[in-house]
Each structure stands twice: as C-alpha cells, then as structure tokens.
C-alpha cells in the first residue's frame, strides 16, 4: 500500500505494509491425533491463494469464548519436527506448542518455511558448513542466502480468514510479532517458549540470542 502525505511544501511517498486480508478457506476437516486421548480433536484448515503461494496449514483448537487465543507460528523443520534432530530446538518447541494450545485454545500455524525460508537442501548445506565451524548466520551468508528469508503476511491472512485478529503469540523471536502487527494482527502478549538447550544445539541457540535478537532465557552449555 502506498500513502501520499505532505510534509512542508513537498509531497512525501510513504510505503506502509498492507493489512493482510482474508483468503477463502479451501477445506476444514477434523484431525484425530494419537495424542488426543479423548480430548477435543482440532480442526485442520487449508486455504486458497495465500499471498506467498505456499501450502501452509492452520490447526485450531477452539477455546473459551472470552479468552485471547494462543498462537504458535511454527516454521517447518523436517530434521527437528519429524526426525527428532537435536541440532535445533524445533521438535520440543512444536510438541510444547501443541500441548499448550490444546489446553488453552488457539491455533498452530504450521508454516512451510524450511531452513528459515531457504529450503531443506540449502539448510543441509548450511549444516555442513556449521560442521566446519561457521555459525548459523555466516553459513547462510556463505551460501549467498539471506540470513532469514521468512515473512509472516500469509500467516496473518490465515488468522484473518479464521476470524482471529487478537492473539497471544508463543515465540522468542520479536520479528514474528512485528511481522504480524504490520499485517493488522493485535499481539496482546508474547508467551516465551521453553529454552530447550542441549550439547548439540547450544551454539545454535546462543547465536540466535547474540546475532538474531531472539529473547531466550539464559542459554547455558549443557554437559
Ligand atoms: N538456514 C538454517 N535454518 C535453520 C537452521 N537451524 C534451524 N533452522 C530453521 O529455522 C527455523 C526455525 O527458526 P528458529 O530461528 O529456530 O526459531 P524461530 O522460529 O525464528 O523463533 P521461535 O518462534 O522462538 O521458535 C526452521 O525453519 C528450521 O528449519 C540453520 O542452521 N540454518
Ligand atoms: Zn529445527
């Protein structure tokens, strides 16, 4: 969106982020989970024509009418989410998010942004460079990739489509909050995720704090 405003005697062009609009919901199904144990089963949503063209998913556990829904925007990490890799904290963060959202009501947005948006094979290339001593930031830069290629406008579209514009966000990454707010989502509270530290991901988590501005609790080396 481009706004024209005048300052002094000249016209000033101001580029502001457009509030994300809703898109059509393509399908809504109920998803029984192995871990549900008789608890409420969530609804799984797909969407038509999200602005970044990706096939993101929303998983919704309805909560009390008067509560602000808890939302997790989880960036895809096949190695962590599926294989249980200990090089990062994604797997336990995803499990924690599902438990909390199921208990409190809210939405898991599973965003297809593997490798902070550079893709799976590029992430594995970056891992190989990290085995040679580069940190997660310099590894991306050595591959001529952006440090973080993610955007959150499609996530905002999904929330708008579900009629949810006021949320509590489960994250340690301030950029996610800023990205949603630019697209018209009111984030009333940041809910921190647990710091899942181990011997293999210690350096990665420390770099997230020192170079990427993430707000983790103390990252202590683990034996
Ligand atoms: N390029 C790259 N991506 C990585 C690396 N390790 C994890 N990822 C990806 O990073 C994404 C998760 O980002 P993180 O920086 O761990 O956390 P975040 O999502 O920004 O923040 P939180 O909401 O606090 O979890 C996932 O898409 C992972 O696949 C790495 O070394 N290099
Ligand atoms: Zn991961």
Image (spheres, rainbow, N blue to C red):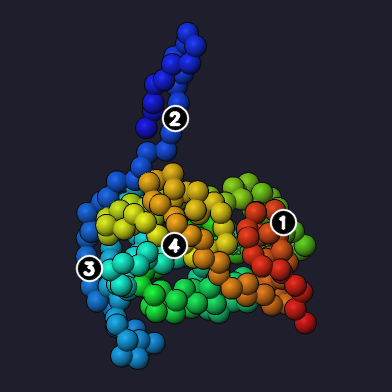
Q: State whether residue 78 is above or below residue 166.
A: below
**Residue 76 in the image: x percent, y percent?**
48, 65
The N terminus: image quadrant: top left
The quadrant of the rendering that contains the C terminus is bottom right
Above/below status of 8 relative to 43: above
Q: Position of residue 21 (x, y in %)?
A: 29, 46
Relative to 216, residue 174 above or below? above
Sequence-wise first label, 1 or 2 = 2
Q: Mark 1 packing: few (<14 Cα in 10 Å), some, or many (20+)?
A: few
Q: Is any part of residue 114 visible from this angle?
A: no
Answer whether labels 4 and 2 touch (C-beta < 8 Å).
no
**Nearer mark to the viewer, of 3 and 1:** 1
Find out if the beta carbon at label 4 lies less than 8 Å from the nearest ligand 1 atom.
Answer: no
> Which residue position holds label 2?
15
Relative horizontal placement of residue 17, taking residue 148 as reference (left or right):
left
Q: Is residue 19 left or right of residue 145?
A: left
Q: Which residue is mark 3?
A: 28
Q: Earlier in the sequence, mark 3 or mark 4?
A: 3
**Disc 3/disc 1 C-alpha distance (Å):** 41 Å
Label at residue 210: 1
> Which secondary structure lies at badge 2?
strand
Q: Nearer the viewer, residue 35 or 86?
A: 35
């Amino acid at each position: 969106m481009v706004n024209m405003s005048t300052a002094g005697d000249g016209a000033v062009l101001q580029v502001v982020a457009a509030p994300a609009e809703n898109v059509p919901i393509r399908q809504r199904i109920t998803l029984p989970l192995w871990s549900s144990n008789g608890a409420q089963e969530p609804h799984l949503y797909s969407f038509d024509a999200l602005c970044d063209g990706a096939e993101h998913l929303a998983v919704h556990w309805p909560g009390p009418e008067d509560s602000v829904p808890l939302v997790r925007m989880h960036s895809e990490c096949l190695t962590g989410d599926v294989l249980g890799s200990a090089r990062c904290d994604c797997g336990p963060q995803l499990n924690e998010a599902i438990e909390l959202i199921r208990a409190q009501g809210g939405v898991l947005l599973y965003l297809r942004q593997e490798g902070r948006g550079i893709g799976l094979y590029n992430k594995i290339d970056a891992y190989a460079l990290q085995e040679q001593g580069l940190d997660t930031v310099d590894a991306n830069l050595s591959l001529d990739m952006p440090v973080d290629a993610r955007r959150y406008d499609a996530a905002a579209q999904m929330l708008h489509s579900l009629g949810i514009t006021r949320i509590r966000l489960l994250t340690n990454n301030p950029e996610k909050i800023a990205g949603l707010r630019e697209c018209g989502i009111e984030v009333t509270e940041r809910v921190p995720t647990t710091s899942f530290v181990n011997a293999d991901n210690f350096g990665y988590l420390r770099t997230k704090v020192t170079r990427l501005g993430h707000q983790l609790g103390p990252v202590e080396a683990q034996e």
